[in-house]
């Protein structure tokens, strides 16, 4: 019997470094988050639970968020396997920039996202951290992958 690693390793992105594998992981998590947005308002309410969000979280809004998240997941998935293509890399980077701008503005300007380090802000920590950290990571590593 072959080791477990060899049985699934060929499905992973074959480019060097952690970024392609991270993009794959984030894309899969994003796709699952999209499904959640379609079946339950709970996760969306955890993210958008800020002081000015009362009554603004609807099923339509959650499904729209789920659709947008799924589109980002597809782009990120493609980038995990084609990270050396400049257009694909830029599209994936842009999804993180848009997500960071969205969550940042909802937190700081519109106040519909709970402050991450306050009680009740746990739903906003993940999106804010993933968007900002991955965006910076991709910005810094452009030359390592795109030739």
Image: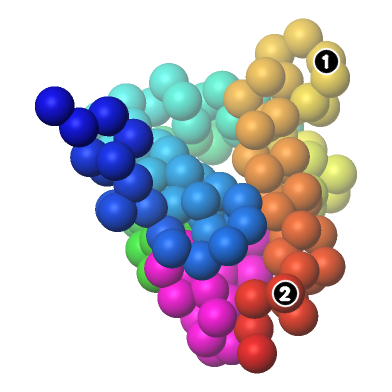
| Residue 147 belongs to the span the image colors magenta | no
Render colour scheme: rainbow
Residue 113 lies, in percent from the top left, at 70, 34
**Which of pointers 1 and 2 indicates the residue nearer the eye?**
2
136 with respect to 91 (left or right): right
Q: Residue at x 72, y 41 (%)?
A: 128
Q: Magenta: predominant secondary structure element?
A: helix
**Residue highlighted by disc 1:** 118
Mark 1–mark 2 distance (CA, rounded to whole Å): 37 Å
Which residue is the extreme one toward the top? 119
User: Circle 2 — which element?
Assistant: helix
Q: Which residue is drawn at the image coordinates 47% and 44% (left, top)? A: 25
Between residues 28 and 94, which one lies in front from this camera angle? 28
Task: Decide: is 113 above or below 144.
Answer: above
- The numbered dot on residue 144 is 2
Q: Residues within 10 Å of mark 1 (few under 14, many from 20)?
A: few
- Can residue 59 be seen? no
Tag of residue 5: none
Query: What's drawn in magenta, residue-wise?
Result: 79-96
Contact, mark 1 vs mark 2 (Cβ under 8 Å) = no
Pick the residue in front: 134 or 4: 4
């Amino acid at each position: 019997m072959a080791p477990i690693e060899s049985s699934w390793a060929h499905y992973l992105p074959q480019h060097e470094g952690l970024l392609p594998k991270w993009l794959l992981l984030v894309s899969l998590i994003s796709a699952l988050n999209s499904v959640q947005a379609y079946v339950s308002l709970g996760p969306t309410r955890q993210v958008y639970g800020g002081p000015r969000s009362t009554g603004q979280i609807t099923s339509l809004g959650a499904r729209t968020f789920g659709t947008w998240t799924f589109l980002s997941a597809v782009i990120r998935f493609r980038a995990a396997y084609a990270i050396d293509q400049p257009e694909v890399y830029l599209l994936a980077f842009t999804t993180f920039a848009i997500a960071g701008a969205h969550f940042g503005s909802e937190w700081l300007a519109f106040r519909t996202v709970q402050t991450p380090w306050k009680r009740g802000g746990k739903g906003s920590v993940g999106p804010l951290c993933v968007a900002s950290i991955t965006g910076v990571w991709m910005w810094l590593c452009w030359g390592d992958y795109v030739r």
